[in-house]
Image (cartoon, coloured by chain):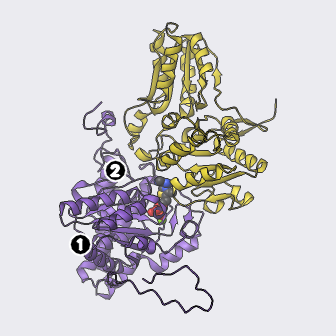
Chain colours: A yellow, B purple
């Protein structure tokens, strides 16, 4: 066992960035407000990097998302490994053409001649009353594009390990940070290295029901575990970690074992990642399930400003417990 | 405008003759507005209302009664007041970004409806669904309140399109920041607006910072009034800390666009005293820098001196301050005591029908 240190997600990201930049001079950083002169990023995750590696390698950019991602792709196809920050996930919409039509497709469209080792870091999540244009979970949009990986960590060790993997990966990766998980401290091995993309983590083993989640909703699922245990339900909890490509094997193995599945995410339930997972489980395990796959997610609504409405927008641990109980019949 | 040639003249060749100055019409140099005592008093009153309203909003935020992102307009009051005093509420359209409280107050929108939106109440102007950054009053032709930096410029271009298409005599005013002026869609909008000679006043509120990034760290051409030049949009740089200079420029601009000459770009040099939002510790600038602007260029103090020169007494101003404080505290009481929206509201206004 290596030595463990306590840190939160912000510190884990910062540590991963320092390591990646020290190890590989091809890693560059672009984003709004990220240099130390501007504060090292809105959440401070880039703090210290420009001082150590220079403003030419850690560039504060104008507010020009489309050009930030476009330029990062241009650098990437020339062998560099840019880490571009889009301050909040809703602002990726401004750069959607670059992400969807270019970053995700260049390798294929060039018959494999080009490689886009680009990491896009972004932040999102409801719960801070930032309303309709600052809090959406759009990972499903990106997962719908072939050619880009979508990574959604839920804890400090994963923040570090998964970010290291994204930076090293030869393909574009969207790395989604969430306000609900970034500030929560956790144990991280001092030598925490890359964690493979596309591999889920079994957080708790169980036999009655499989709960699948990621990002902030992972923490709410963990909060539901005590209630489930109290009710005598043995729950298996899976942290998906990567949304695309997702760990089908881990999910199907668990679903086959328990026969009951609840998927929980903050993204709007309609057409959300849960729909893909549920459909796959139904296709692969038809006849082996003890009940329909249940999905919990955001309602069909923009994220509201009002506190009580915003609270109602988010799935609660109680609702998770209820959903599982409903499945147990 | 002389057109500069980039080609180097060959050695010994005759000196190139300077390109002729463009004979394109330009707006007249704005002149500082000569306000009557009553007019200046009205400007002062509105600026003070914005200042006190924002101070109160800051307090309520500190008390936890306002959540989310809350961007105060303190320091920039002369811009919205001076410009919008030249517009006609309900006829001319106004659109801006998330730092929108001042523009709403300057358009005569009720302080209590704004404050109740900041506290997320049912009685708020967006029924608690939008919050500080997303407020609208279609009745006044105030079209938001937008959180995506630069988006309001394209939207504003559409507002102007409507004014022209419907020939309703109105003009659009689209505000955006120095930071927003680096978004691509701003230039797509400039081109369309000039191409179609749309009646729109583009207003860059250059408060020197975009969150923590100063203009010089983000803008190759930091004289932002020039940003429309290659689209043939005339630009004027204006002292945004002097409400009468602002109003003077507004008159020039309104005259230009109402006459069908197409868009105009105003760069208002201004300053925000507070952090970018309530959660910004503002470490990218010194306290001295902020204090120096407050001491030397405060728009309210400036107007106050002008008023005193016109014979307004200290006592008159004190009475006014009292009246404004009362309006603001009533708005705050209303915003604290009115009910929050019911949970069913989550599903209304998404589409016309509820699903
Ligand atoms: C497309 C987009 N990118 C980034 C942001 C985050 N953001 C919000 S305000 C802001 C700074 C804008 O500065 P400026 O345009 O100068 O306006 P000011 O805040 O000074 O009024 C940034 C980067 C955003 N809201 N939208
Ligand atoms: Mg600014």
Q: Tell me the mark number nearer the camera, choosing from 2 and 1.
A: 1
Residue drawn 42% across and 50% down? Answer: B66
Question: Which one is in front, B309 or B33?
Answer: B33
Q: Which percent across, then down, holds residue A166?
A: 66, 40
Instruction: Establish whether ligand 1 lies closer than 8 Å to the Cβ of label 2.
Output: no
Q: Is B169 rendered above or below residue B22?
A: above
Q: Is B162 rendered above or below residue B19?
A: above
- Residue B17 numbered mark, or none: none
Q: Chain of mark 2?
A: B
Question: Which one is in front, A236 or A222?
Answer: A236
Q: For numbered disc 2, what is the local secondary structure?
A: helix
Q: Which percent across, then down, holds residue B335?
A: 32, 50
Residue drawn 78% across and 47% down? Answer: A23
Asked whether the beta carbons under mark 2 and mark 1 sit within 8 Å of each other, the answer is no
Q: Chain of mark 1?
A: B
Residue drawn 75% across and 46% down? Answer: A19
Which residue position holds label 2?
Answer: B117
Q: On the image, which quarter does residue A52 sit in?
A: bottom right
Give the mark nearer the N terminus: 2 vs 1.
2
- For marks 2 and 1, give the CA distance: 33 Å
Q: For numbered disc 1, what is the local secondary structure?
A: helix
Which residue position holds label 1?
Answer: B258
């Amino acid at each position: 066992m290596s030595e463990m240190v306590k840190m939160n997600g912000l510190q884990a990201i910062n540590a991963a960035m320092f390591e990646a930049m020290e190890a590989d001079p091809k890693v560059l950083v672009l984003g709004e407000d990220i240099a130390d002169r501007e504060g090292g990023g809105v959440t401070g995750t880039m703090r210290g990097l420009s001082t150590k590696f220079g403003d030419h390698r850690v560039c504060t950019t104008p507010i020009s998302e489309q050009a930030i991602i476009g330029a990062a792709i241009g650098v990437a196809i020339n062998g560099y490994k840019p880490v571009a920050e889009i301050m909040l996930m809703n602002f990726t919409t401004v750069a959607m053409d670059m992400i969807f039509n270019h970053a995700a497709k260049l390798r294929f469209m060039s018959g494999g001649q080009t490689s886009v080792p680009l990491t896009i870091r972004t932040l999102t999540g409801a719960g801070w009353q930032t309303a309709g244009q600052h809090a959406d979970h759009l990972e499903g949009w990106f997962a719908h594009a072939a050619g880009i990986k979508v990574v959604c960590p839920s804890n400090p060790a994963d923040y570090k390990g998964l970010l290291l993997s994204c930076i090293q990966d030869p393909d574009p990766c969207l790395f989604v940070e969430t306000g609900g998980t970034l500030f929560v401290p956790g144990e991280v091995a001092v030598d925490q290295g890359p964690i493979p993309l596309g591999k889920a983590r079994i957080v708790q083993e169980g036999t009655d029901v499989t709960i699948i989640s990621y990002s902030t909703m992972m923490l709410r699922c963990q909060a539901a575990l005590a209630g489930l245990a109290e009710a005598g339900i043995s729950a298996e909890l899976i942290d998906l970690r990567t949304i695309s490509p997702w760990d089908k094997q881990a999910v199907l193995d668990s679903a086959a074992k328990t026969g009951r599945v609840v998927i929980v995410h903050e993204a709007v339930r309609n057409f959300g990642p849960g729909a893909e997972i549920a459909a796959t489980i139904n296709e692969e395990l038809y006849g082996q399930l003890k009940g329909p796959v249940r999905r919990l997610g955001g309602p069909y609504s923009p994220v509201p400003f009002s506190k009580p409405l915003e609270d109602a927008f988010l799935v609660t641990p109680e609702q998770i417990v209820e959903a599982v109980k409903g499945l147990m019949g | 405008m002389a057109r500069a040639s980039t080609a180097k003249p060959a050695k010994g060749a005759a000196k190139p003759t300077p390109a002729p100055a463009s004979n394109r019409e330009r707006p007249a140099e704005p002149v500082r507005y000569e306000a009557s005592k009553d007019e200046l008093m009205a400007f002062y009153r509105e600026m003070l209302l914005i200042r006190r309203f924002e101070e109160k909003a800051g307090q309520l935020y500190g008390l936890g009664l306002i959540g989310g992102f809350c961007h105060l307009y303190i320091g920039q009051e002369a811009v919205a007041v001076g410009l919008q005093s030249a517009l006609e509420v309900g006829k001319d359209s106004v659109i801006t970004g998330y730092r929108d409280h001042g523009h709403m107050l300057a358009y005569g929108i009720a302080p209590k409806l704004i404050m109740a939106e900041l506290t997320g109440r049912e009685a708020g102007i967006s029924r608690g669904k939008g919050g500080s950054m997303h407020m609208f009053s279609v009745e006044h032709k105030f079209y938001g309140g937008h959180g995506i930096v630069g988006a309001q410029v394209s939207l504003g271009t559409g507002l102007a399109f409507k004014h022209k298409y419907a020939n309703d005599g109105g003009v659009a005013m689209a505000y955006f920041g120095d930071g927003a002026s680096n978004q691509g869609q701003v230039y797509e909008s400039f081109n369309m607006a000039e191409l179609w000679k749309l009646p729109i006043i583009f207003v860059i509120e250059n408060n020197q910072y975009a969150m923590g990034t100063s203009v010089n760290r983000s803008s190759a051409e930091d004289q932002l009034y020039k940003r429309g030049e290659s689209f043939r949009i005339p630009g004027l740089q204006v002292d945004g800390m002097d409400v009468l200079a602002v109003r003077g420029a507004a008159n020039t601009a309104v005259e230009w666009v109402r006459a069908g000459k197409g868009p105009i770009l105003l760069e208002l040099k201004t300053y925000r005293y507070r952090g970018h939002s309530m959660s910004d510790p503002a470490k990218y600038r010194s306290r001295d820098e902020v204090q120096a602007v407050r001491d030397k260029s405060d728009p309210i103090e400036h107007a106050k001196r002008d008023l005193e020169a016109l014979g307004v007494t200290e006592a008159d101003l004190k009475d006014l301050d009292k009246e404004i404080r009362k309006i603001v505290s009533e708005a705050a009481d209303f915003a604290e005591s009115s009910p929050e929206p019911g949970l069913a509201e989550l599903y209304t206004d998404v589409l016309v029908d509820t699903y």
